[in-house]
Amino acid sequence: MLFRACQFEFRFPRPALVMGILNVTPDSFSDSGRFFQPEAAVAHALDLVAQGAEILDIGGESTRPGAEPVSEAEELRRVLPVFAALAGRVAVPLSIDTVKPAVAAAALAAGASIVNDIAAHRAEPEMWRLVAGAGAGYVCMHMRGTPATMQARPEYGAVAAEVAEFFAERLDRLAAAGVAPEQVVLDPGIGFGKTAEHNLQLLTGLGSLTKFARPIVIGVSRKSFIGKTVGAGLEQRLPGSLACACWVVAHGAQIIRAHDVAETAQAVRMTEALGSWNS
């Protein structure tokens, strides 16, 4: 199984990739804007790579539950200096976490090679055509509504089956827009329009998503469902995040999106080592 993102290629099976999270926002739920200034963001990005991040995911608009959108101009102001500083300085792919085609286009021109699109449920094909033309990687994520509305009583009949149906339909739409299968990775959107119970059902039903023969990316780092499940505040959720990361790697995920890169990489490598002895 191949994942291609511009000049980068990853062939699976191989050790799971850790995607380091870099929020260039003043209102991130996880870091309270510590990396909002470009200098701090670049320093943190370099530290994440040193810790073992094999992809850097950079976002300039908060996607926490209840977050309000920011303007295109403001999002560009936040992220473009970071891409300019990192492009050519790090040897790992840079990902732009955005729902705006214009921001994605500018980031790709500035050195990004992946578009992480939480709005993959969009109807219009502009983002997909952009990805196709650039040969960029594309993270296709499941979400209902928008960050501002997604947690307003989400309901599913069978959440894993419904997410799988969404991916089947999206892969057809992406292909029609010219995006090759090897450009796409799938993200079930843990915490995006799901209750804590829905998230647990998705994680335990991850095998139902492997049928698409596309890499699966999971982002559970520090999310509120961990706190609701085990009674942990934001600063106490690392053990729960690592438990989820180990679980999904053991059950078919290839990419883990994380804030705590060194800890996640070590936990994942240990999980893989145990799996190799069990094979």
Image (spheres, helix red, strand yellow):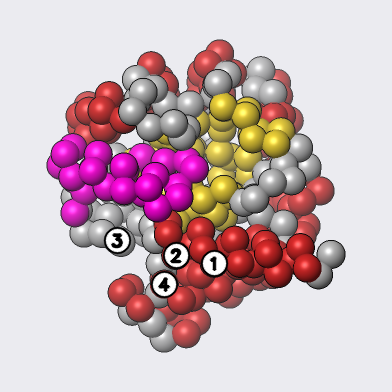
Q: In the picture, residue 102 is in which quadrant?
A: top left
Q: For this view, does 81 lie left or right of residue 275?
A: left
Residue at mark 1: 267
Tell me residue 230's x, y (percent): 47, 85
Contact between labelled residues 2 and 4, with CB atoms less than 8 Å apart? yes
Check disc 2 and report the residue beneath it: 263
The residue pinned by badge 3 equals: 29
- Distance of label 4 from label 1 (alpha carbons): 11 Å
Which span of residues is magenta-colored?
34-58
Residue 51 in the magenta stretch? The answer is yes
Q: Name the amino acid type tagged 3.
A: Phe
> Of the residues shown, which amino acid type is indicated by label 2?
Glu
Q: Percent from the top left, x then y, of residue 165?
A: 74, 48
Residue 216 sits above or below residue 266 on the image: above
- Whether residue 161 is in magenta: the answer is no
Q: Nearer the viewer, mark 3 or mark 4?
A: 4
